[in-house]
């Protein structure tokens, strides 16, 4: 059972660190309090560090189109602009999990694709769509519900913006991520996309009111 009680009145539900009495695959000593919320523009350094950590991960880096060597060459102004867009943009929203030390332990970004606009695969459709990309949770926090909360907040933001379905792609070799997405209500469509790092499975999740 997860608790959010014991915090000052006025804290929003998304701002309250979650205290989980039972977290699978983690010992009590490893468990930490954490909250999920939208990133803030001034947190670009933390966002940069987390992304670089993700790109160094032997499996998780497959979730990113960007390569580590390219990311390391980006100037601070690029990281600032990317984080500001994730914090305040109307067509992109970045959501982060933050622990009780103010360290980023996970992130997911939702992108709304307008009718007539090409997605990252070059596909164009006449209805609004949404992709959830750059999903990452630090190794020590995996299995503790962080990815579920990240996806839930991203999906909630998409619902608020009138999107009825979320889509994501996961590398065929990333079995752990595939299983996590299935548990979160995503279904494999059978569509496959071949990108630079290999074959990606397309998964979708309906965002009708009340869907989990």
Image (cartoon, rainbow, N blue to C red):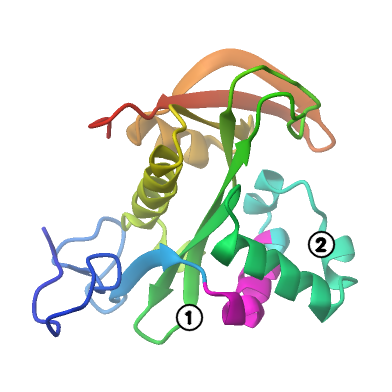
Q: Nearer the viewer, residue 23 or 149?
A: 149
Measured from the top left, where is residue 10 in percent x and y? 17, 79
Q: What kind of secondary structure does the magenta stretch mostly adopt?
A: helix
Q: Secondary structure at mark 2?
A: helix
Work out whether residue 136 can be spotted: no
Residue at position x 12%, y 81% from top? Answer: 9
Q: Is residue 32 magenta?
A: no
Image height of 20 relative to 183, above or below: below
List the residue tagged with mark 1. 103
Kindly report the distance in space between the C-alpha atoms of the residues bearing marks 1 and 2.
Answer: 21 Å
- Label annotation for residue 68: 2
Q: Left or right of 15: which side holds 69?
A: right
Residue at position x 37%, y 30% from top? Answer: 207
Measured from the top left, where is residue 12 in percent x and y? 23, 70
Residue at position x 87%, y 71% from top? Answer: 74
Q: Residues in magenta?
A: 40-54
Residue at position x 34%, y 53% from top? Answer: 149
Image height of 175 relative to 147, above or below: above
Measured from the top left, where is residue 208 in percent x and y? 32, 26
Work out whether residue 22 can be spotted: yes
């Amino acid at each position: 059972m997860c608790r959010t009680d014991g915090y000052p009145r006025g804290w929003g539900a998304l701002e309250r660190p979650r205290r989980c009495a039972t977290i699978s695959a983690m010992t009590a000593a490893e468990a930490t309090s954490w909250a999920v919320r939208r990133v803030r523009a001034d947190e670009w350094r933390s966002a940069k560090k987390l992304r670089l950590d993700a790109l160094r991960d032997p499996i998780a880096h497959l979730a990113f189109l960007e390569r580590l060597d390219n990311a390391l060459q980006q100037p601070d102004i690029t990281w600032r602009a990317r984080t500001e867009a994730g914090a305040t943009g109307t067509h992109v929203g970045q959501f982060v999990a933050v622990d009780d030390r103010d360290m980023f332990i996970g992130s997911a970004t939702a992108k709304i694709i307008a009718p007539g606009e090409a997605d990252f695969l070059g596909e164009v459709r006449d209805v609004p769509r949404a992709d959830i990309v750059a999903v990452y949770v630090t190794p020590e926090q995996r299995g503790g519900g962080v990815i579920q909360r990240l996806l839930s907040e991203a999906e909630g933001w998409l619902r608020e913006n009138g999107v009825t379905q979320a889509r994501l792609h996961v590398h065929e070799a990333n079995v752990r991520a595939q299983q996590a997405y299935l548990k979160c209500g995503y279904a494999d469509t059978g569509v496959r996309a071949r990108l630079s790092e290999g074959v990606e499975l397309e998964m979708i999740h309906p965002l009708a009111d009340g869907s989990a």
